[in-house]
Image (cartoon, helix red, strand yellow):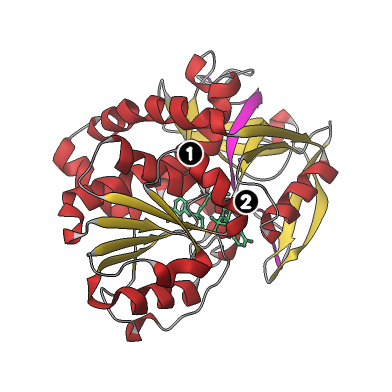
Amino acid sequence: MTASTQFVVARDDLKTCRLIETPLPEVTQLPETGLLVKVERCAFTANNITYALLGDQLKYWDLFPAPEGFGNIPVWGFGKVVQSRHPDVAAGEILFGYFPMATYLVIEASDVKKAALRDGAAHRQSVSPVYNSYARVTGDPAFAGREGDYQALLRPLFMLSFLVDDFLADSDFFGAQNVILSSASSKTAFGLAWLLHSHRKPVRVIGLTSAANAAFVQSLGCYDKIVNYDKINDMPATAPVAFVDMAGNADLRGKLHRHFGAQMKYSSRVGLTHQDAGSDDDALPGAKPTWFFAPDQLRKRAKEWGPGGIDQRFAAVWSGFTRALGPKLEIVESRGANAVQKVYLDTLKGDVRPSQAHMLSLAE
Ligand SMILES: NC(=O)c1ccc[n+]([C@@H]2O[C@H](COP(=O)([O-])OP(=O)(O)OC[C@H]3O[C@@H](n4cnc5c(N)ncnc54)[C@H](OP(=O)(O)O)[C@@H]3O)[C@@H](O)[C@H]2O)c1
């Protein structure tokens, strides 16, 4: 193999995508502590489309350089080290982390520890360190087979669910009796719904979704009530509510705020599944919508809970979540450029059934 295949998208028109080939370095051409990593399999969900939508704003495009005007969308998944210039990292090792949509990635291994290493490449340092860290997972059953698919598909999303659940509980749910989640069929939303529901927190969980996805949301068993987007005005508006917005749809958010008025005690923006960027949130009644910033809650809890405190608490709920809801997903594996392109475009159009979870590999 002498080239890496990359799947890149036009930053200002995500419908335009193409494959490019870049030459692979010889081992002697790798950086001093360089690793050549073969990207083996990665998850693809609406979250990756959000990375593309926010690529400039949140610097995701900086991570994996692409030709002018194009970007390489980051994906969570697995790679195998095929060449190593670092004395403590062997060829054959399996890494879990943030990869480009490509067949190979060169990593400048730094901070090499037993459980993890970091890519120290200069162009990657503008993003949060979490995006440059790779777990060393060779032989770890928690990262193999179906469990590995769950790690790639669900772990990064469930971390957000975990942090929002913790933040809401820590804030006494802002006095709300009901927590409303939009894009209830999304993995991030149903992770949060499961956490709220399974801990018998003193709130009811209401999922908003499209008519086509209501049956799937019902089948998850973690929402107390499911409401279609076109029926939100039928909800009783007498009790205080908190809203966690995965859809990012300004029209929907406006309708909800106007419907609940002063009963809207907290309104948090988390996602953009509906790919709608603009709004005039200042004029809305009820609590002002604000972006939930996960690193803030992470920093707060790291300080309060001490070393390992977050990981321990996350691990305590992770296996229950994947046991309960993992089997609700049909994992679909796609290999090769054409199949990857189809999954990308279908996800962009919202043309993926919520029960389907895609694992991709650009290599045939
Ligand atoms: N802020 C953070 O740190 C953070 C962390 C994790 C996730 N998130 C965000 O949470 C959101 C959910 O991500 P996910 O990966 O969990 O999603 P997912 O499982 O792929 O969600 C699929 C659902 O999203 C809705 N959807 C997807 N594409 C759509 C389109 N083009 N038009 C209309 N609806 C569409 C549909 O739900 P409905 O029919 O139910 O609307 C669909 O069933 C993303 O925006 C993601 O970036 C944010």
Residue placed most toward the observer, 160 or 35: 160
Q: Quadrant of ligand 1?
A: bottom right
Amino acid type at circle 1 is: Leu
Q: Does residue 111 lie above or below 302 as drawn?
A: above
Q: Which mark is residue 220?
A: 1
Location of mark 2 (residue): 64
Q: Let me know if residue 81 is in the magenta part.
A: yes
Q: Let me know if residue 265 is in the magenta part.
A: no
Residue visible at 42% across and 72% down in the picture? 233
Across and down, in percent, residue 120 comes to: 49, 42
Whether ligand 1 has any atom under 8 Å from the Cβ at mark 1 is answered as no
In this image, 166 relative to 330: left or right? left
- Disc 1 is placed on an element classified as helix
Residue placed most toward the observer, 333 or 232: 232
Residue interval drawn in magenta: 69-87
Whether ligand 1 has any atom under 8 Å from the Cβ at mark 2 is answered as no
- Disc 2 is placed on an element classified as loop
In this image, 354 relative to 312: left or right? right
Pointer 2 with pointer 1, Cβ within 8 A: no
Main secondary structure found in the magenta portion? strand
Across and down, in percent, residue 188 comes to: 46, 47
Quadrant housing the N terminus: top right
Q: Is residue 214 visible?
A: yes
Q: Is residue 86 visible?
A: no
Amino acid type at circle 2 is: Phe
Residue placed most toward the observer, 90 or 343: 343
Q: Residues within 10 Å of mark 1 (few under 14, many from 20)?
A: some
Residue visible at 56% across and 44% down in the picture? 216
